Amino acid sequence: MVRSKRNGDLYFGIICGLAALCGIGPLLWIVYDLVKLGAGRISPGFFTDAVRESGRAGGIAPVLHSTFLIVLCCLGAAIPPGLGVAFYLTENGENRFRKWLRASVDLLATIPSIVFGLFGMAFFCRFLGLGFSILSGGLTLACMILPVLIRTTVAAVEALPDHLRSSATALGLTKTTILLRVLLPGATPGIVIGITIGTARALSETAALIFTSGYATRTPDSLLDSGRSISVHIYDLAMNIPNGAQGASASALVLLIALLLINFLTNFFSELWLKNLHSSK
Amino acid sequence: MSRLRSDRVLSFVLNAAALLCGALVLGIVLFLSIEAAPTIFSGKISAFFTDEKWQPGSERDPQFGIFSMLLASVLITLLAAILAVPVGICGAIFRVFYAPESLAKWQDRFLELLAGIPSVIFGFWGLSVIVPFINRYHPPGQSLLAAGIVLALMILPTIALTTKSALTAISPSLMAGAAALGLSRPAQILQVAIPTARKGIAAGCALGLGRAIGETMAVVMVCGNIAQIPHSVFDPVRPVTSTIALEMGYATAEHKSYLYAAGLVLVLMTALFLLVRIRKGASQW
Amino acid sequence: MVESVVITGSTTVAPVVADAAKRFEENNPGIRIDVQTGGSSRGISDAKSGLADLGMVSRHLNTGEEDLSATCIAIDGVGLIVHRQNELKGLTREQVIQLYKKEITNWSGVGGTTGPVTVTNKADGRGTLEVFLAYTGLDSADIKADVIVGGNQQAIKTVAGNPGAIGYVSIGAALSEIENGTPIRLLESDGIPAVPAMVAQGKFPITRPLLLVSGGQNSPLVAEFLSYLQSEETRDIIESHLYVPVAK
Amino acid sequence: MAEESALIEVKNLSINYDDFAALRDVHLTIQKGNITALVGPSGCGKSSFLQSLNRLTDLIPGCQTTGEMILGGKNILSPGCDVLSLRRKVGMVFQKPNPFPQSIRRNFEIPLREHGFSKLETTDRMEDSLKRVGLWNEVSNRLSRSAANLSGGQQQRLCIARALALDPEVILFDEPCSALDPHASGVVEDLISSLRGSVTVVIVTHNLAQARRIADHLAVFWVRGGSGTIVETGATDALFTSATDPDAKSYLTGIRG
C-alpha cells in the first residue's frame, strides 16, 4: 500500500508531465515549421524595408509600424474602461445591474472575432466616419480584449486578502485612495498578465482587422490612415498570395519573437514591481 | 471636502465605464439585429430552421438551413473542450506541483507564446499536418476531429494558464493541512487543490470555450465546411463562424442578411447558455 | 490635400492592383491609392454605393450589374488541379460534371488509378465558383462536395495534402506554387493544357476577366490610373502574378 | 498527571533553511498521553520543531533536518520513513483554521477514504469525532454545507475533529487559539485539555497562562548564538516556580520575552 501510494505520486506526475508536453509539443512543431520556411527571409533589411510584390519580397517595416499603432490604440482604449468595469464589479454590494454586467462581459468574451470585425466596420468605420483606419482597427480590438482585461483584473483584485479593503477603510482612507494606493498596486501583477494576454490576442487577431484597419501596406501618416497589422499581413500572404508561405512564415516568426519579448518584459517588470513593493514596506 | 469629491468623481468614472461596457454588448446585439432585420421581419427566418440544407448560392433552389451549422459550432467546441480541459488542467498541475522552478518558467513562456500564435498559422499547420494524417485513415481528413484538435491546441494555453494562477493562489496553509492529514500528493491535488481552485479553473475553461465557439480563421481551414449533420468525428462539418468568414465578403443583399442573422443566432445561443449557467449559480465570478 | 483613390473588392485582383498602385504612387507624388480586399461582391456593392472609387471583380458581371462600367485589366484561366501523385492527364467537361455530381466517385471511372475522389469546391459567392459553374452549366446545389474551401491558396493546400483530391484554382496561382515545389498538378481541360499561353490565345475553356468597375463618372485621376493599368508600364506586374495582360 | 512513558525521543535535532540554522542541538523527550507545551519568544524555532515532528518541513524548499526523532522505534527523519502513515499517526492543527472549502462531510471523507476506511466507517468516525469536539449538535443538520461558512471557533474544532478521526497517537497544535476570540479560544483550550490521556499533545503557544493551565510538561525555546534551541525542560509547575536557566526564568515569570 505504501509502495503503491509512492508510485501513484510518480505515475500521476508523469501523466501530468505528458499532458504538459502535449501542449508544448505542437508549439515546437509549429515553430520548427516556421523556422524551416521563414528563417531564410529574416535579415536586418526585413525590418527596415517596405513591402514589395505583396510581401513576397522586401520587408515589413510599414506593417510593423501599423501594428504598433493599432496595438497602442487598442490598449489605450481598452485599459481605462477595462479597469473601471473591473473595479466597479469588485466593489462591495451586489445588484441586478452588476449581475447583468457580469453576464454581458461573459457574452462579450464569446462573440466571434469576425462579428467584432463586422460591428467595427459598421460602427467605427461607417457610423463614426473613421473609415478604414488604424483607429477603427484599434478600437475594434479594444472591444474584443475588454472581457479578458476585466476578468483578469477582477480575479487579481479578488485574490487580494479580504482584510485589505476593510483595514484600509478602517484607516479612514477615501475610496479613491484605497483603490489607487491599496488595491491597484496589489492587483498589478494580475492586471499585467491580463494586459499581456490582451496584447497577444490583439497582435494575433486577423478577422476583426480585415474589415476595419484594412489592407494598405504603406507606412501610415496618421491614425486615420489605413494600415495592415502583422497578422493581416500573414493572413493575406498565406491565403491570397501564391508562394506567400515564406513571407508569411518569416512574418509569423517576427510576431512570435515580439510576443516573447513582450512576455519577457512584462514578467521582468512585474517582478521588479513586486520587489519594490516588498522592500518599501 | 475635496477628498469626498474625488470619491464622487471615482464613482462617476466607474459607473461610466460599467455603462459603456454594458452599452457595447447591447450595441453589438442591436447592430446584428439591424443588419439581420430584412431576414427577421420578412418572416424568412423560419427558413433557418425548416430548410434542410445551406445553399444560398443556388439559383434553382436556394436554401438557408442553419441547424447543422449551429450543431457543428457546438460539437466542435465540445470536442475541443473534451481534449483541452483535461490536458490543460493536468499540464497546470505539473507546472505548479511537479516541475522544478526552471522548467516551470519555460512552460509558462511556451504557453504564453502558444496563446499568441495567429489563428491562420494554426489553421495552416492543421491543414498541412493534422488533416493529411487523418486523411490517411478516413478521407477527406478535413473533419470535426481535425477542427477539434486544432481548436483544443488554441484554447489550451488559456485553460492551462488560468488553472495555473488559480492553483498558485491557494493558501499554503490549506495544502499544509492536507499534507498533515497524511494525504498523498495526488490526493492533496485532486481532492483539495482542484476543488478549492474550481472557480478559477471554471472561469478559465469558460474563457477558452468562448474563444473556441467564436474562432474562425483556423477552423475554416480544417473543418471541411460541408453543412451537414456529422455521423462520426471524421465527417466534415461547417460551423456558423466559418460560414460568415467564407461568404460575408461575397454575399449580396439577402444572403448577407442571412449571414448576419446566423451570427445573431449564434450570439443568442451563447447568451442562453450563459443564462442557464447563471441561473444555476455557476457563473459567479 | 492629398488626392486619393479608394479601391475595394476581389482578393484575386487586389495583389496586382496593389503592386501597380505602389508604382503609380512612386511616379506621382502626392497621390494615394488605397487598396482594400473583401471579395468580388464587395467590390461591386462598394462601387455601386460610391464607398469606393473602383471595385475589383474577378468574374463576369451578372444580370443587374450591367449598369456599372467595367475595365478589364487581365484575363485569368481557372484550371483543375490534382495531387502530383495522380497520373491523370486531363478531364473533359462531361467527366468534370460527373465527378462534381458524384456520379463517379472513383478515379478509375475517368481513366485514372483506382482510389476514392475527394471533391473540393469553392464557397458560395467566390469568383472562381461562378466561372466554374458557368463552364459546367451546373447549379451550385448540384455539386456534392467533400470539402469546401475559401480562396485559391486553401484549395491548393487541400489538394496538396490529399492524394485523392480534385479542385480548381486560378492557373497563375497554381503555376506559381508548382514552380515552388508544391505537390500538385494542373490537368488539361478538354485537351487544352492549362498554361497562360492557351488562355492568351483564347483556347482554354475556363477563363474569367479581372475587372475594375465603377458606378458613375470617373474622376480624371481614376481614369488615369485605369489607363495606367492597361498600359505597357504595368504589363510586367500583371505577368509577375501569372495573369494574362489584355492586348490593347 | 498521566502515566509517564516516553513516546517520542528527539536527539540532537538541527534544522537548517539553506545557510541559516534555525534550530540546533535539540534534545527532548515527549511523554505519552501528556500535553507538552513549547514556549518561547517568536523566531526561536518552535514552529519548525513542531513541523518536523510530522515532516511538514519537507514542504519547505531548502529545509534540511539532521539528528534523530524516534517514534515507535523508528526514526521519523530517516529518508525511508513513510511520511503518509507518519502523518496519519501524528496529526496537526494550525494557527489559522484551515478546513477544506468544501462540505463538512468531505472534510472527513477526503482523509478517511484516502487512508482506506469504508464509507460506513467514515460516517461513524465523522460522527464520533464531531461529538468528541462538541460540534455534532451544531452541524449534524448541515453536513453537506460548506465548512467555510462556520465560525472561526467552529472551523478550528472541525480541524481538530478531522485530525482526531484518523485516530492519531499525537496531535501537534501550532498556536491553535491565537486566531480565535476569547470564548472560542476557551472552548478549544478545554477541548485540548480533554484529550489528555487518550492522545499525546504537543502545543506551541505564546499564552503562558494557557500553557500553565493545560500543559504537563514545558519546553522553553530561546535563541542562542543565532539559532534556536531548547534551554530548559521540565514539569510545568516546577518550571514556572523554579526555572534554572536565567532566560527561561525571566520569560516564564513575565519579566522578559
Image (cartoon, rainbow, N blue to C red):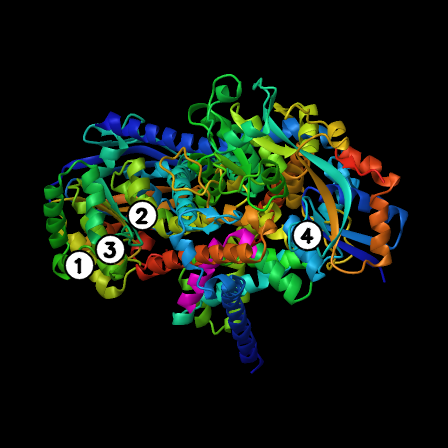
Magenta residues, dominant SS class: helix
Three-letter amino acid code of the residue under disc 2? Pro
Q: Residues within 10 Å of mark 2 (few under 14, many from 20)?
A: some
Depth check, front residue: D208 or D122 = D122
Marks 3, 2 in one chain: no
Three-letter amino acid code of the residue under disc 4? Gly
Depth check, front residue: A200 or A119 = A119
Q: Which residue is mark 1?
A: D142
Q: Relative to D123, does residue B99 appear above or below in the rendering? A: above
Q: Residues within 10 Å of mark 4 (few under 14, many from 20)?
A: many
Marks 4, 2 in one chain: no
Q: What span is in magenta?
A: A98-116
Q: Is residue A155 visible?
A: no
Chain of the residue where label 4 is placed in the rendered structure: C
Three-letter amino acid code of the residue under disc 3? Gln
Q: Quadrant of residue D227?
A: top left
Furthest-bottom residue in this view: B1
